[in-house]
Image (cartoon, rainbow, N blue to C red):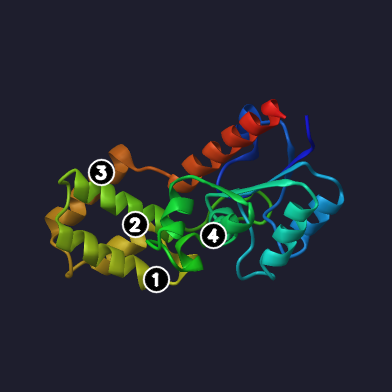
Amino acid sequence: MPGIVVFLGPSLSQARAEEILKADYRPPAKRGDLYSAAKEGAGIICLIDGVFFQECSVAHKEILYALEAGAIVLGASSMGALRASEMDVYGMEGVGRIYKAYKGGHLVSDDEVALVFDPFTWEPRSEPLVNIRFNLDLAWQQGVISNSARTRLLRCAESIYFPERTYERMMESAVGRVPEKDLQAFREFLAREKRDFKMEDAILALQRVKEIANAV
């Protein structure tokens, strides 16, 4: 089985990840980390989490280097989904709903997947916009909230700087702009059916890596 390196942080706990796949788990990738993994001889590199604003982010050239070195490179969930949507034409494999949304142009900004997290435990300290967006979509599709409420709530979420973005902050910002019945209905929806799409895509990516590794 080839050496597997996974860059993982707030999208999924390492304990949960290890239940799915045995690998060399490393912190969210910064510039040069994929290059180093490829140079060390990793056969499969899975990029899930990466830094956005704290340090320089993963460069496109290092992904090309890894691919040219013979590594299989996958991306999903967060920085991985963003880079995969840009680099799949060169051989990087994208996995999951968020990757597909970037690839289809439904998501554009890095801000969609950005969040702040505890630097020691990787626990999220804010909510990524993509999770809010997709949960609002689900609530609207199920008839929980109106389309106008969905649009206004999303605009409220977009107006909040990403380190401070949470569902509660969004709801507070929406008071007076969105009918109270819609706010209450969405609160109840979150308590009952809220999904973590970044986590779901991270799990899909690890399952895909396992499938590839077992086939090699």
Give the amino acid type for the residue marked by disc 3 in the picture. Answer: Phe
Q: Position of residue 79 (x, y in %)?
A: 58, 58
Mark found first going from the N terminus, 4 or 3: 4
Q: Quadrant of the N terminus?
A: top right
Which residue: 52% across, 37% down?
204
The residue to which callout 1 is attached is 160
Give the amino acid type for the residue marked by disc 4 in the picture. Answer: Leu
Q: Position of residue 212 (x, y in %)?
A: 65, 33
**Residue 81 picture quarter:** bottom right
Q: Residues within 10 Å of mark 1 (few under 14, many from 20)?
A: some
Mark found first going from the N terminus, 2 or 3: 2
Q: Position of residue 153 (x, y in %)?
A: 26, 63
The residue to which callout 3 is attached is 189
Q: Residues within 10 Å of mark 2 (few under 14, many from 20)?
A: some
User: What's the mark number on residue 133?
Assistant: 2
Rendered view: 174 above or below 215: below
